[in-house]
Image (cartoon, rainbow, N blue to C red):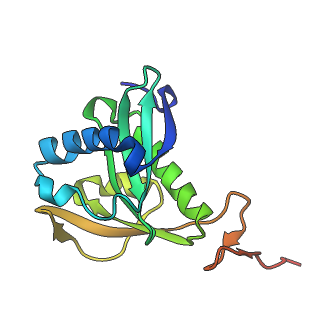
Amino acid sequence: MPQATAVDLRPASWDGDRAALQAIRRSVFIEEQCIPESEEWDDVDPLARHVLAFTRNRDAVGTGRLEPTGKIGRVAVLPQYRGGGVGSLIMRHLVNQATESGFTRVYLHAQVSARGFYERLGFIADGPAFDEVGIPHVRMSLGIERQDGNEVGRHGHEEHPLDPR
């Protein structure tokens, strides 16, 4: 099983990296999970911030996206690369992108079977399970803050913690 350190992440764009993004998502969502192709591609793709994970051989093995609303989605890792931390690296990258964009909270629709993965990353379920593309999902969210410990306010400004004195 490949280790997370064996992959590199880089920001991707729908226009420049569509073939790699689609190949991973087609393999995971359309072929493996039998999601209808018409449900996989949407108008959000050109607007979202994407990320790609590559092996040292430059093979694209994982992806995810951050929507303009703060929703993380389309997180996919090819089966042979699961369990080695690639998904966690993708999620950390997307959360960091959200922080840089000024979000104080991100959310996602997790497949119920992946709920534990997202809980280990700090996400908390926000309600009951629901059906999305024929698969049970649950809405989950995560409050985020800057690496320096100062929260980022609604408008991207720092909100310094209270002085403990």
Q: Nearer the viewer, residue 75 or 13?
A: 13
In this rendering, position of residue 62 left or right of residue 34: right
Q: Position of residue 42 (x, y in %)?
A: 25, 62
Residue 85 seen anywhere in this rendered image of the structure: no
Q: Residue pushed farthest top?
A: 57
In this rendering, position of residue 70 left or right of residue 165: left
Q: Nearer the viewer, residue 119 or 60?
A: 60
Residue depicted at 71% across the width and 63% down the height: 149
Q: Is residue 30 above or below residue 9?
A: below
Residue 98 seen anywhere in this rendered image of the structure: yes
Q: Position of residue 126 (x, y in %)?
A: 35, 75
In this rendering, position of residue 78 left or right of residue 2: left
Q: Is residue 57 above or below residue 86?
A: above
Residue depicted at 42% across the width and 69% down the height: 141
Q: Is residue 121 above or below residue 160?
A: above
Q: Residue pushed farthest right?
A: 165
Q: Quadrant of the C terminus?
A: bottom right
